[in-house]
Amino acid sequence: MAGARTRSGMSDAIAIRRGTVRDRAFVIDLGRRVSPTSVSSLRIALPPLVEGAYERLVEYVLAREHDVLIAESGGVAAGFALLIYDLPDEITLTEQAFVAYMAVEPAMQRRGVGGELLASIEEHARKRGLPYLSLMVTEENTAARELYAGAGFITERRMMTKAL
């Protein structure tokens, strides 16, 4: 695969490649299945509404300057990342790459797929000369927060919510 990034480990090699239109069904399906992890337990959210919001996010990403990265393990799609390049920081207007969504197949989690996706995302952002890479994560998603912290991300802002 041209431009692919591969890591071999104790299990199958993980390869990262740019997504194509043929990957759209995988991105929609996996994103819909894991989208509840993006919702705080503070909020009541019906699954069809969360899935619909995810689908609208995909359309938003695809309408912007973006990349879709697909992680494969043993030749099978294992995860993806949706990146936006034309979404500057909302306060400083500093250019950045923004991870709009990242997901790994539940059966493939904690096997290095997310880490390889992050490394590839960073590589894409650096090649574009972008000074920052940003993302958002639900406070309760401890596994994702640990992955991001391990990759060098720090908390820059914190959204606080109060149920009324």
Image: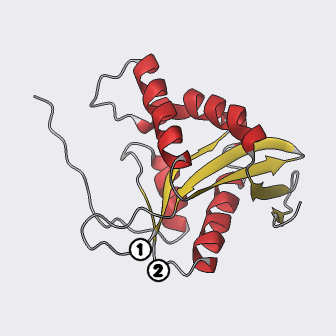
Q: In the picture provided, is 6 more to the left or to the right than 61?
A: right
Q: Are marks 1 and 2 in contact (CB under 8 Å)?
A: yes
Marks 1 and 2, the one that precedes in the sequence: 1
Q: Residue at x 50, y 54 (%)?
A: 64
Residue 92 placed where, x, y %?
Answer: 27, 74
Residue 150 placed where, x, y %?
Answer: 54, 66
**Quarter of the image where one finds residue 117:** bottom right
Residue 153 placed where, x, y %?
Answer: 46, 68
Structural crowding at the residue carrying mark 2, measured as other residues with C-alpha within 10 Å and reported as few (<14), some (14–19) or many (≥20): few
Q: In the picture provided, is 102 more to the left or to the right than 23?
A: left
Q: Amino acid at mark 2?
A: Pro
- Name of the residue lying farthest toward the left: 164
Quadrant where the N terminus sits is bottom right
Question: Against 76, is 28 above or below?
Answer: above
- Name of the residue lying farthest toward the front: 63
Q: Residue at x 64, y 70 (%)?
A: 124
Q: Which residue is mark 1?
A: 95
What SS does tag 2 mark?
loop
Q: Which residue is mark 2?
A: 131
What SS does tag 1 mark?
loop
Q: In the picture provided, is 140 more to the left or to the right than 51?
A: left
Q: Amino acid at mark 1?
A: Glu
- Residue toward you, 106 or 90: 90
Quadrant where the C terminus sits is top left
**Quarter of the image where one finds residue 25:** top right
Mark 1 vs mark 2: in front: 1
Structural crowding at the residue carrying mark 1, measured as other residues with C-alpha within 10 Å and reported as few (<14), some (14–19) or many (≥20): some
- Residue toward you, 70 or 64: 64
Spatial separation of the CA atoms under disc 1 and disc 2: 7 Å
- Residue toward you, 86 or 76: 86
Question: Against 102, is 163 above or below?
Answer: above
Residue 80 placed where, x, y %?
Answer: 66, 47
